[in-house]
């Protein structure tokens, strides 16, 4: 098993670090355009092998994709991060060109790879990757819903006063401050609806906090978060390489499911060795379906911007 992580910034390096700690591959390649950055971080990580007792080989490459040849999974985290006050949508012009270049280069050496998209705006970058690569839809997966759901569980646990791991809670829709949909109706605490522990107003506040979870961190830190995004990416990669068949909310191509077509959007899917295997129907009620349709409209408007760019 060989995994490539493109982008050696905070998110990419944290993703690679989580992957090697979980021993998900024989080799991990870290790629970046900045001279020496990926090599340095790869060497630093490799020097933890005897301390953390893993045997994964880690190498770095400055924009030399020949070193990524034969990768089973390619994780794309490259692009400029968000700054305070910046929306994910504002990144589209710059990051679309970066992601297109990465996909083209990675495919030359790893035509059979599964692509995991982390770069923002993630839904549009996932759609771009699908259209640019020409790959089967099951091999293109956007990570965002896993991260959003982890934040949802965090805010629920703080409100209830319980362990996050005892919660099952899912966020679907777009990976954006106004497009994600925390499914409070379906959230449970050890099988019991969270509505039995929190009032309607408390649940609305949890959902609101979840939706601006990324922006909250950007304001506090001064840039995009990386610990939870990196861990979320590695968790998705683990389900792929170990064929775990876990159900995660991921951004995938819809062809009629949830009432949408020709768009990549977050829905619950089964993740295994061939990528995403099938979409799970959560039987949304009318309010949730309406929110999902509005989310799709917003994401589709972002996708339309791609046609105006010279890529």
Image: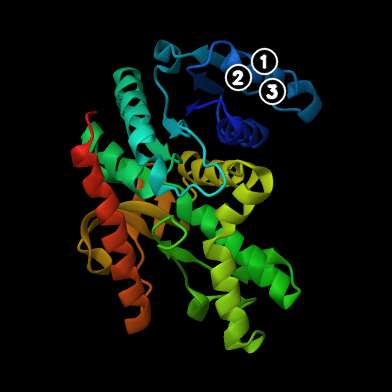
The residue nearer to you, when weighing 193 against 305, is 305
Residue 18 in the image: x percent, y percent?
A: 63, 37
Disc 2 target residue = 58
The residue drawn where x is 48% and y is 38% is 241
Q: Residue furthest front?
A: 85
**Residues at marks 2 and 3, CA–CA distance in whole angstroms:** 7 Å
Q: Find the distance from the CA under tag 2 to the CA under tag 1.
A: 7 Å
| Residue picked out by circle 3 | 45
Q: Secondary structure at mark 1?
A: helix
Sequence-wise first label, 2 or 3: 3
Circle 1 Cα neighbour tier, 10 Å, few/some/many (<14 / 14–19 / ≥20) = some
Direction from residue 236 to residue 300 in the image, left or right? left
Q: Looking at the image, do the residues carrying marks 2 and 3 touch, with CB atoms under 8 Å apart?
A: yes
- Residue 114 image point, x, y percent: 37, 36
Give the quarter of the image for residue 290: bottom left
Frontmost of labels 2 and 1 is 1
Residue 270 seen: yes
Q: Is the residue under label 3 in contact with that under label 1 (CB below 8 Å)?
A: yes
Q: Which element is circle 3 on? A: helix
């Amino acid at each position: 098993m060989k995994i490539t992580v493109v982008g050696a910034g905070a998110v990419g390096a944290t993703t690679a670090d989580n992957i090697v700690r979980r021993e998900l591959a024989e080799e991990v390649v870290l790629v970046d355009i900045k001279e020496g950055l990926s090599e340095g971080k790869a060497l630093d990580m490799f020097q933890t092998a005897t301390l953390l007792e893993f045997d994964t080989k880690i190498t770095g490459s400055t924009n030399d994709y020949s070193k990524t040849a034969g990768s089973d999974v390619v994780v794309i985290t490259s692009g400029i991060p968000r700054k305070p006050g910046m929306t994910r949508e504002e990144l589209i012009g710059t990051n679309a060109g970066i992601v297109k270049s990465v996909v083209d280069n990675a495919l030359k050496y790893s035509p059979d790879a599964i692509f995991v998209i982390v770069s923002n705006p993630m839904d549009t970058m996932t759609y771009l990757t699908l259209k640019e690569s020409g790959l089967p839809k099951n091999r293109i997966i956007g990570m965002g819903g896993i991260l959003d759901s982890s934040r949802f569980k965090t805010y629920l646990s703080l409100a209830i006063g319980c362990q996050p791991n005892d919660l099952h809670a899912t966020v679907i829709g777009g990976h954006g401050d106004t497009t994600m949909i925390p499914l409070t109706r379906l959230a449970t605490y050890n099988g019991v609806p969270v509505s039995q522990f929190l009032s309607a107003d408390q649940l609305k506040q949890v959902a609101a906090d979840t939706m601006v979870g990324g922006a909250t961190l950007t304001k506090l830190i001064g840039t995009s978060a990386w610990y939870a995004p990196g861990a979320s990416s590695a968790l998705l990669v683990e389900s792929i390489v170990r064929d775990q068949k876990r159900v995660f909310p991921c951004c995938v191509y819809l062809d009629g499911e949830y009432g949408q077509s020709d768009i990549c959007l977050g829905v619950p899917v089964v993740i295994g060795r061939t990528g995403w295997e099938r979409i799970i129907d959560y039987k949304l009620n009318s309010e949730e379906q309406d929110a999902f349709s509005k989310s799709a409209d917003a994401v589709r408007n972002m996708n339309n911007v791609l046609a105006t760019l010279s890529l």
